[in-house]
């Protein structure tokens, strides 16, 4: 899951970015509305956190520009103002949620999880692939009923694979959604993490859920499809 944070207050932006990264999300950030809108157009983000008071282009204008392109990425607006009118205006303009400053990182991540679950396709709290179970609220993984501990990044990769268990994902697609812009390609990072996941998810199980499709990429499925 890749998230874009558009916020000009550097300190707050850093707190949000670090908080989301700690949860295993890939996170990019933009310090103004102009760059933020451009980034929203050039990458397939899974969610955007958008401040209202921004230099160069306000959050309100950025929101309208994104929706005008028929981009339905889930967007949470941030603002210091607690005006009800503000909220109505932005929900009308296509914002999915609204958070008034100051807020805690825990509150933001709960809202993000809720948002990612309901869009763009309805996803339930629990993802199941064969005997693998992923609780997206608790971010807990079990296989055959046995709890598996994963790092935040391993979890992010597994969740992404599980959300698309009906298809094979290329390394480029995986990097686009699980890593962020500061990641520089040309390494075998995906293969390294797949190897780690295999050791935790598939080792000791007769049926291997993680599939390698030579020349294409990886998939996670129970072979039933
Ligand atoms: Ca601001």
Image (cartoon, rainbow, N blue to C red):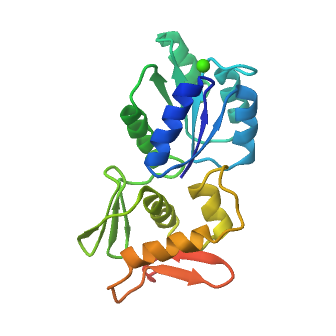
Residue 11 in picture, x, y percent from top left: 54, 26
Residue for point 51% across, 46% down: 119
Residue 36: image quadrant is top right
Q: Residue furthest bottom?
A: 206
Residue for point 37% across, 63% down: 150
Q: Is residue 215 left or right of residue 25?
A: right
Residue 172 in picture, x, y percent from top left: 68, 65
Residue for point 59% across, 56% down: 179
Residue 47 in the image: above or below residue 152: above
Work out whether residue 170 can be spotted: yes
If the picture is divided into quarters, which one holds ligand 1?
top right
Q: Is residue 93 left or right of residue 88?
A: right
Residue 54: image quadrant is top right
Residue 203: image quadrant is bottom left
Q: Nearest the camera: 194 or 48?
A: 194
Residue 222 in picture, x, y percent from top left: 42, 80
Numbered label tally: 0
């Amino acid at each position: 899951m890749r998230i874009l944070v558009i916020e000009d207050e550097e300190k707050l932006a850093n707190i949000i970015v670090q908080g989301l990264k700690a949860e295993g999300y890939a996170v990019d950030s933009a310090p103004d509305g102009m760059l933020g809108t451009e980034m929203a157009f050039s990458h397939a983000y899974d969610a955007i956190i958008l401040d209202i008071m921004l230099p160069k282009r306000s959050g309100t204008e950025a929101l309208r520009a994104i929706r005008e392109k028929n981009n339905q990425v889930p967007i949470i607006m941030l603002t210091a103002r607690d005006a009800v009118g503000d909220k109505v205006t932005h929900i009308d303009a296509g914002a999915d949620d609204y958070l008034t400053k100051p807020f805690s990182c825990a509150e933001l991540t709960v809202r993000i999880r809720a948002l990612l679950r309901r869009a763009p396709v309805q996803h339930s709290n629990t993802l199941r692939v064969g005997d693998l179970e992923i609780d997206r609220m608790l971010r807990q993984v079990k296989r055959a009923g046995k709890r598996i501990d994963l790092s935040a990044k391993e979890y992010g990769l597994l969740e992404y694979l599980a959300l698309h268990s009906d298809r094979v994902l290329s390394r480029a697609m995986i990097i686009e959604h699980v890593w962020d812009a500061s990641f520089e390609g040309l390494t075998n990072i995906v293969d390294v993490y797949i190897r780690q996941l295999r050791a935790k998810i598939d080792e000791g199980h007769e049926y291997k859920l993680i599939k390698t499709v030579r020349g294409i990429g990886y998939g996670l499925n129970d072979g039933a499809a």
